[in-house]
Image (spheres, grey):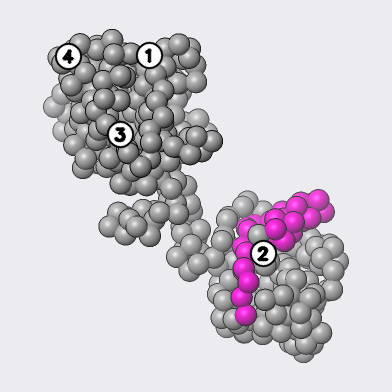
Amino acid sequence: MNLYEYMGKEIFRKYGIPVPEGYVVEKSADVREYKKPVVVKSQILLGGRGKSGGIKFAKSQADLNAAAKELLGAKIRGLTVTKVLVEDMVNIKKEYYVSFALNRSERSPMLIASASGGVEIESVPHSEIFTRKIDPLLGYSDFIGREASKFMKFDKNQSAQFRDILGKLYKVFSEEDCELVEINPLMETAEGQFIAADAKVVMDTDSFFRHKDINITDPEKTPLELEAQSKGYAFVELDGNIGVIANGAGLTMATLDALTLHKGKPRNFLDLGGTDNVEIVAQAFDLVLKANPKAILVNIFGGVTKGDTVANGIVEAKKRFDIKKPIVVRLSGVHEVEGRKILKDAGIESFPTMMEAIKMVVKVAGEAQ
Ligand code: GDP
Ligand code: MN
């Protein structure tokens, strides 16, 4: 999971990596009194903000107000800006690049550093990039920082600051279970201080159980996706109008493909997983209904998830949530005969094959208001 710059910088601050003083606002009216030159940075999960107008410099209260007003709600690189970070402006002498990244083929973290910072590292010639594999068992040691400093042609003072930051950055990388920690640019100020002007932190989502202290809410997820996640469902919102409940990620994906093939537009991805619990089926309806689809398609190939359990769950959901929207069911596999009978008795149409159900749901969604 990719963190916003301001979240990454909070972590950096906690580990003692120098970052500019700053604060986050969501409304332009919340900007504070102007005291000294500031940078107003749109918080989006893409880089290249500098080149796309996502970063503004303010040298007066009027500039600051205007920058916040202009950026909040604007689209930068296709993403809507909901927060801006207002930070003390740094007087740049030089920009560097430094990161620790998990290299999967090497099965190790890698230190990457360059004296050509402030631009995408991909565009820097290989000869100007220092890379060093870090043994995951031994971790980072100062001699590695010395090698890097030599490559960067740092003097004693620069090297001391750089190595201090490297040590702390590696600590962030390992203790916070990161896939990437990147500072680009790592700025050297006119006064000779090193400071992290940007922060990119990618955390391994599988480690979240170890970070209960940190309030990690994936900024890329919608409120409904977060609710689904907290209830244990694999759920993704899409922009169509047909709600989807299926079992198994593969069948769910195939369902979305088949709907699209028949000119239907899925509203969501929801994988029930392997369950034999009526309540889990009913709760899935609750989530899908909140996405307000025109019709709901249930596509179940019974196995662990038995046909009669699903049928009882559908009947329960229809009653509990008083569902008036069309529900179309494909049910086959384990206990399909029992399941389809339960549905029929409740007045819900079901089909033994996927394509019949797909065609029907596309038709009824098209007719629904
Ligand atoms: P990105 O373009 O999304 O990676 O955003 P960055 O935070 O890296 O900022 C892009 C560029 O804006 C930097 O490389 C700098 O050239 C410039 N910049 C950012 N913060 C400051 C600052 O405090 N002072 C100055 N002078 N330039 C800055
Ligand atoms: Mn950057």
Q: Residue at x 48, y 39 (%)?
A: 107
Q: Are marks 4 and 1 in contact (CB under 8 Å)?
A: no
Coordinates of residue 293 in the picture (x, y in percent): 64, 63
Coordinates of residue 336 in the picture (x, y in percent): 79, 81
Q: Is residue 222 left or right of residue 348?
A: left
Q: Earlier in the sequence, mark 1 or mark 3?
A: 1
Q: Are marks 1 and 3 in contact (CB under 8 Å)?
A: no
Q: Disc number at residue 156?
A: 4
- Report which residue position mark 3 lands on: 140
Of residues 338 and 265, the one drawn nearer to the viewer in this rendering: 338
Quadrant location of the C terminus in the rendered image:
bottom right
Q: Are marks 3 and 4 in contact (CB under 8 Å)?
A: no
Q: Which stretch is magenta? A: 250-276
Question: How far is mark 4 from mark 1, CA to CA?
Answer: 19 Å
- Report which residue position mark 1 lands on: 116
Q: Earlier in the sequence, mark 4 or mark 2?
A: 4
**In the rendered image, which quarter is residue 328 located in?**
bottom right
